[in-house]
Amino acid sequence: MRKIFYLILVLLVLSGCSSNRKRINELSQRVATQEEQITFLVSQMRVLNFEHSRDLIGQEILDTQDIVIESVEQPPQVIIVSPAIPSSLTDQEISRLYNEGRRSYESRDFAAAIRAFSVIANEAPEHALAANSVYWIGESFYALADFSAARLYFQRVQDQYPGSNKFVDAQVKIAMTWIRQNRRDIARTILEAVRRDFPNYERMSVVDQNLRLIRQ
């Protein structure tokens, strides 16, 4: 557009007609006005393109949120993730974590207890407190009414630490998880085995209490 204007301007100047100066001014104003209109239209197109792109992005975000919401609505699962700490824990660090886990358990902060005990169980499985840590993870899940997860950790005590002082306790707790899940037949078999194999078990009253519960 500007090139056309300049071409007209040059032709008129070369013609030497002073009477055309008014015409030149009018053309100049018209061209300027048209350029402003074009600039305005271009800017509006950019705005519209931006708004359209933003709407598309916004819809993608909403779609993603829908997926997330659908995922959240699924049955919750507790996942233990080991904290990113060095694997070579000192005895002092292990003792601190163990005491922290017990305090959390006693204050009914079972998620915090699981995190603390899991560090020991995963990072120091050969330590003297490892078996107890695994056991208390099971107790924490039991307190959260996640009996399947609790049973896995009680069974882990039996499988990995057969010489642990928590071995029989874990066996009794396995039976109790089955009771909570309405499998009294399995629980009775386990508890009767405890009575037979460990007659001096210091918590035999718990065994008897649960056997009475089963027989009701």
Image: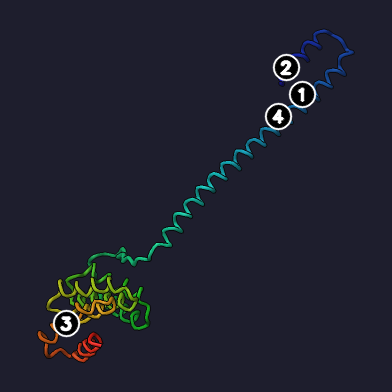
Residue that label 4 marks: 38
Q: Answer with left or right where residue 58 lies relative to residue 214.
A: right
Q: Earlier along the polypeptide chain: callout 1 or callout 3?
A: 1
| Element marked by disc 2 | helix
**Splitting the image into 4 quarters, where does residue 49 fall?**
top right
Mark 2 and mark 3: Cα distance apart in space: 99 Å
Q: Which residue type does callout 1 highlight?
A: Val
Label drawn at residue 168: 3
Mark 2 and mark 1: Cα distance apart in space: 9 Å
Label drawn at residue 4: 2
| Element marked by disc 3 | helix
Circles 2 and 1: CB atoms closer than 8 Å = yes
Mark 4 residue crowding within 10 angstroms, few (<14) / some (14–19) / many (20+): few
Residue drawn at the location 31% of the way across and 77% of the way down: 140
Q: Position of residue 131 (x, y in %)?
A: 19, 76
Identify the image's colour scheme: rainbow, by chain, secondary structure or one colour. rainbow
Q: Which residue type does callout 3 highlight?
A: Val
Of the pair 15 and 66, the residue shown nearer to us: 66
Q: Earlier along the polypeptide chain: callout 2 or callout 3?
A: 2
Q: Earlier along the polypeptide chain: callout 3 or callout 4?
A: 4
Q: Earlier along the polypeptide chain: callout 2 or callout 4?
A: 2
Q: Which residue type does callout 2 highlight?
A: Ile
Residue 135 drawn above or below residue 198:
above
Residue drawn at the location 44% of the way across and 54% of the way down: 67
Q: Earlier along the polypeptide chain: callout 2 or callout 1?
A: 2
| Element marked by disc 1 | helix
Q: Which residue type does callout 4 highlight?
A: Ile
